[in-house]
Amino acid sequence: MKRKEKVSIMKNVALITQIGVTIISTILIALLIGKKLDEWLGTGVIFTLIFILLGISSSFMTILRLGAKEKNRPIEDWGEEDEDEDEDDHPDF
Protein backbone atom coordinates (compact mmCIF):
# COMPACT_ATOMS: atom_id res chain seq x y z
CA MET A 1 0.00 0.00 0.00
CA LYS A 2 1.35 3.39 -0.93
CA ARG A 3 2.04 6.03 1.67
CA LYS A 4 -0.59 8.39 0.21
CA GLU A 5 -3.23 5.66 0.45
CA LYS A 6 -2.34 5.03 4.10
CA VAL A 7 -2.62 8.74 4.88
CA SER A 8 -5.99 8.87 3.12
CA ILE A 9 -7.25 5.91 5.16
CA MET A 10 -6.07 7.51 8.41
CA LYS A 11 -7.78 10.80 7.53
CA ASN A 12 -11.02 8.92 6.88
CA VAL A 13 -10.68 7.09 10.20
CA ALA A 14 -10.11 10.44 11.92
CA LEU A 15 -13.27 11.86 10.35
CA ILE A 16 -15.34 8.86 11.43
CA THR A 17 -13.89 9.07 14.95
CA GLN A 18 -14.70 12.78 15.08
CA ILE A 19 -18.32 12.03 14.20
CA GLY A 20 -18.60 9.36 16.91
CA VAL A 21 -17.01 11.49 19.60
CA THR A 22 -19.23 14.43 18.61
CA ILE A 23 -22.41 12.41 18.97
CA ILE A 24 -21.47 10.80 22.29
CA SER A 25 -20.01 13.85 24.00
CA THR A 26 -22.82 16.21 22.98
CA ILE A 27 -25.55 13.87 24.18
CA LEU A 28 -23.74 13.03 27.44
CA ILE A 29 -23.13 16.68 28.30
CA ALA A 30 -26.78 17.51 27.59
CA LEU A 31 -27.87 14.53 29.72
CA LEU A 32 -25.75 15.65 32.66
CA ILE A 33 -27.04 19.23 32.45
CA GLY A 34 -30.64 17.99 32.33
CA LYS A 35 -30.16 15.66 35.31
CA LYS A 36 -28.51 18.39 37.41
CA LEU A 37 -31.33 20.82 36.61
CA ASP A 38 -33.94 18.20 37.53
CA GLU A 39 -32.18 17.48 40.83
CA TRP A 40 -31.80 21.18 41.61
CA LEU A 41 -35.39 22.11 40.71
CA GLY A 42 -37.04 18.83 41.76
CA THR A 43 -38.88 18.48 38.43
CA GLY A 44 -38.64 14.73 37.83
CA VAL A 45 -37.27 14.02 34.36
CA ILE A 46 -38.59 17.00 32.38
CA PHE A 47 -35.26 18.79 31.90
CA THR A 48 -33.43 15.52 31.33
CA LEU A 49 -35.70 14.69 28.40
CA ILE A 50 -35.55 18.24 27.03
CA PHE A 51 -31.76 18.35 27.17
CA ILE A 52 -31.39 14.87 25.68
CA LEU A 53 -33.48 16.01 22.70
CA LEU A 54 -31.40 19.19 22.45
CA GLY A 55 -28.20 17.13 22.60
CA ILE A 56 -29.37 14.77 19.88
CA SER A 57 -30.44 17.60 17.59
CA SER A 58 -27.23 19.51 18.26
CA SER A 59 -25.06 16.49 17.46
CA PHE A 60 -26.89 15.86 14.20
CA MET A 61 -26.58 19.52 13.22
CA THR A 62 -22.83 19.25 13.81
CA ILE A 63 -22.67 16.10 11.69
CA LEU A 64 -24.61 17.82 8.92
CA ARG A 65 -22.09 20.68 9.01
CA LEU A 66 -19.25 18.17 8.70
CA GLY A 67 -21.08 16.54 5.81
CA ALA A 68 -21.66 19.87 4.09
CA LYS A 69 -17.94 20.60 4.44
CA GLU A 70 -17.15 17.34 2.64
CA LYS A 71 -20.17 17.67 0.32
CA ASN A 72 -18.87 17.47 -3.22
CA ARG A 73 -16.16 14.94 -2.52
CA PRO A 74 -16.30 11.20 -2.98
CA ILE A 75 -16.02 9.20 0.22
CA GLU A 76 -12.47 8.19 -0.71
CA ASP A 77 -11.44 11.89 -0.59
CA TRP A 78 -13.11 12.79 2.72
CA GLY A 79 -10.63 14.36 5.07
CA GLU A 80 -8.37 15.54 2.23
CA GLU A 81 -7.20 19.15 2.10
CA ASP A 82 -9.08 21.67 -0.04
CA GLU A 83 -7.38 22.41 -3.35
CA ASP A 84 -7.56 26.17 -2.81
CA GLU A 85 -5.56 25.96 0.43
CA ASP A 86 -1.85 26.66 0.21
CA GLU A 87 -0.11 23.30 0.48
CA ASP A 88 3.12 24.92 1.70
CA ASP A 89 1.44 25.46 5.07
CA HIS A 90 0.75 21.74 5.55
CA PRO A 91 3.44 19.12 5.14
CA ASP A 92 2.54 15.99 3.20
CA PHE A 93 3.00 12.73 5.03
Image (cartoon, rainbow, N blue to C red):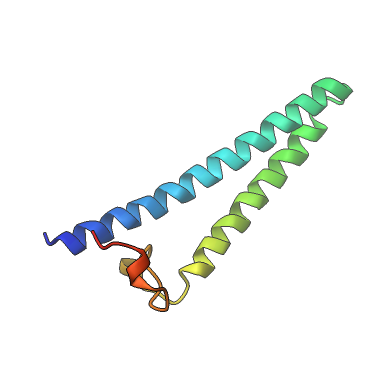
Q: Which residue is at 53% across, 46% downward?
A: 22
Quarter of the picture containing the N terminus is: bottom left
Q: Which residue is at 49% across, 43% downward?
A: 21
Quarter of the picture containing the C terminus is: bottom left
The quadrant holding residue 27 is top right
Q: Which residue is at 56% across, 62% downward?
A: 64
The quadrant holding residue 85 is bottom left
Q: Residue furthest front?
A: 88
Looking at the image, residue 41 lies above or below residue 80: above
Left or right of 12, for residue 23: right
Looking at the image, residue 47 lies above or below residue 69: above
- The image shows a total of numbered marks equal to 0
Q: Nearer the viewer, residue 45 or 57?
A: 57
The quadrant holding residue 51 is top right
Left or right of 1, for residue 53: right
Left or right of 74, for residue 33: right
Instruction: Please provide percent x and percent y for residue 65.
Output: 57, 63
Q: Residue furthest left?
A: 1
Instruction: Please provide percent x and percent y for residue 5.
Output: 20, 62
Instruction: Please provide percent x and percent y for residue 71.
Output: 47, 73
Looking at the image, residue 66 lies above or below residue 59: below
Q: Which residue is at 41% across, 54% downward?
A: 15
Instruction: Please provide percent x and percent y for residue 34.
Output: 75, 32
